[in-house]
């Protein structure tokens, strides 16, 4: 935690920002190790460019700070909402932030907390803290990568166990429920990266399908997009299978997507623009005449959130660097007929790329033995 805090302080000083204000969420946990929930009571962590840390929180949550290795001042309040503003005023005064330039996490800081900060520090300037946050969590260390590899192994084990079931006659919802149970039995955190996608037949043509009551049937494609959590870090995988005899063109797009996925894993390297990975993957699909049916970016970053930087889209100039983790997930979607997506989690290394996921990628019958 202290190493991470030191890196944050360096970024604040470089960008001439006085402090960072955070709601509970992945960055909050990354910097403190604390797991706290957003609720109707406000909670804000302030970290200044001098390394001071202050936390406004409900008194009932104070016990969570016991044994915390991070030096931090707690500013607590009671259940009576009339006491909340006082805690914010105490924090702003103690940390010297009355006229500060405060960076906030734009996707996390709520209106609830923002109003209390503005009331306590009406002369403070509140800005978008994205440049700080992206630089902070972008490159994963060895411990983080070990957790993400474990999250991948848990997810893969859970899918293998699910595929061993007799899925004939089951609905997408029922299969998804079995997969969630298998994830927990395999050791996943309670918090999953997202609700698993299980789609079949024509529903596989929707990249973000939601499991329905549709029953699995002969001739379907069967797509799983799922992940597990391990100590707050996530995996995100997609595999597509066949159910009985599938029409030839659907098998063909499976081969093309497999080739595109392979291309992405082969070429991604340290120093390459993220956009170049998307372009190379997309070129494989376009060369086969299916470019119009690859309707999303090639991938996204992964870590304590299911979607974070770097984003793998064609015009992104961001240079890939060791420790960056992202997905490679090309897909082809034929409306009303079916779609294939194959997704892996990969990390850039000094010498190339390593895949954190290694479940077979080919589009094969769902009841193919994998172990």
Image (cartoon, helix red, strand yellow):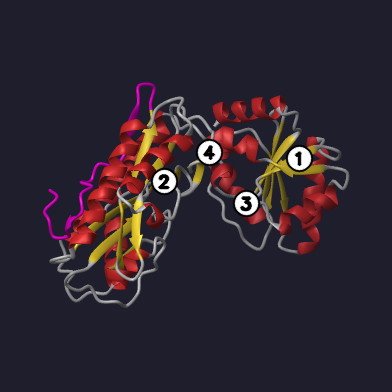
Give the percent coordinates (x, y) of residue 197.
36, 62
Q: Write the start and end of the magenta stretch as one range.
A: 349-371
Please tell me which residue is depicted at 82% across the width and 47% down the height of the picture: 89
Q: How many residues crowd around disc 2 within 10 Å: few (fewer than 14), some, or many (20 or more)? A: many
Reading the image, the residue beneath label 3 is 107
Question: Circle 1 sits on which residue?
Answer: 102
Closer to the camera, 164 or 22?
Answer: 164
- Indicate which disc residue 298 carries: 2
State which tag comes first along the sequence, 2 or 1. Answer: 1
Taking the magenta stretch, the answer to whether it contains residue 66 is: no
Q: Nearer the viewer, mark 3 or mark 2?
A: 2
Element assignment for label 2: loop
C-alpha distance separating marks 1 and 3: 15 Å
User: Which quarter of the rendering shows the N terminus?
Assistant: top right
Looking at the magenta stretch, what is its main secondary structure? Answer: loop
Whether residue 139 is visible to the viewer of this picture, yes or no, is yes
Residues 161 and 43: in front is 161
Q: Upstream in the sequence, badge 3 or badge 2?
A: 3
């Amino acid at each position: 935690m202290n190493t991470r805090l030191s890196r944050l302080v360096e970024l604040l000083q470089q960008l001439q920002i006085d402090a960072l204000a955070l709601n509970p969420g992945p960055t909050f946990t990354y910097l403190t190790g604390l797991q706290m929930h957003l609720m109707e009571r406000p909670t804000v962590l302030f970290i200044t460019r001098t390394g001071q840390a202050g936390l406004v929180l409900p008194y009932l949550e104070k016990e969570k700070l016991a044994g915390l290795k991070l030096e931090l001042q707690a500013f607590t309040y009671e259940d009576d909402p009339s006491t909340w503003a006082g805690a914010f005023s105490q924090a702003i005064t103690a940390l010297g932030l009355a006229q500060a330039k405060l960076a906030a996490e734009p996707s996390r800081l709520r209106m609830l907390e923002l109003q209390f900060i503005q009331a306590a520090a009406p002369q403070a300037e509140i800005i978008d803290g994205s440049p700080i946050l992206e630089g902070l969590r972008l490159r994963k260390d060895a411990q983080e990568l070990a957790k993400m590899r474990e999250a991948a192994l848990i997810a893969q084990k859970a899918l293998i166990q699910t595929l061993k079931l007799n899925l004939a006659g089951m609905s997408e919802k029922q299969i998804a429920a079995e997969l969630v149970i298998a994830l927990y039995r395999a050791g996943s955190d309670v918090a999953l990266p997202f609700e698993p996608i299980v789609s079949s037949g024509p529903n596989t043509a929707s990249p973000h399908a939601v499991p329905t009551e549709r029953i699995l049937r002969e001739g379907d494609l069967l797509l799983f997009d799922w992940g597990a959590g391990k100590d707050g870090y996530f995996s995100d995988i997609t595999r597509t299978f066949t159910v009985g005899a599938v029409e030839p063109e659907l098998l063909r797009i499976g081969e093309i997507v497999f080739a595109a996925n392979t291309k992405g894993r082969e070429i991604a390297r340290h120093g390459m623009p993220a956009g170049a990975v998307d372009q190379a993957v997309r070129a494989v699909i376009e060369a086969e005449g299916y470019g119009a049916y690859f309707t999303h970016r090639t991938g996204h970053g992964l870590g304590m959130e299911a979607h974070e930087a770097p984003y793998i889209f064609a015009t992104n100039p961001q240079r890939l660097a060791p420790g960056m983790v992202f997905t490679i997930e090309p897909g082809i979607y034929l409306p009303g007929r079916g779609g294939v997506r194959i997704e892996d989690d990969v990390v850039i290394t000094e010498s190339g790329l390593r895949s954190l996921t290694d479940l077979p990628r080919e589009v094969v019958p769902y009841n193919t033995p994998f172990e």
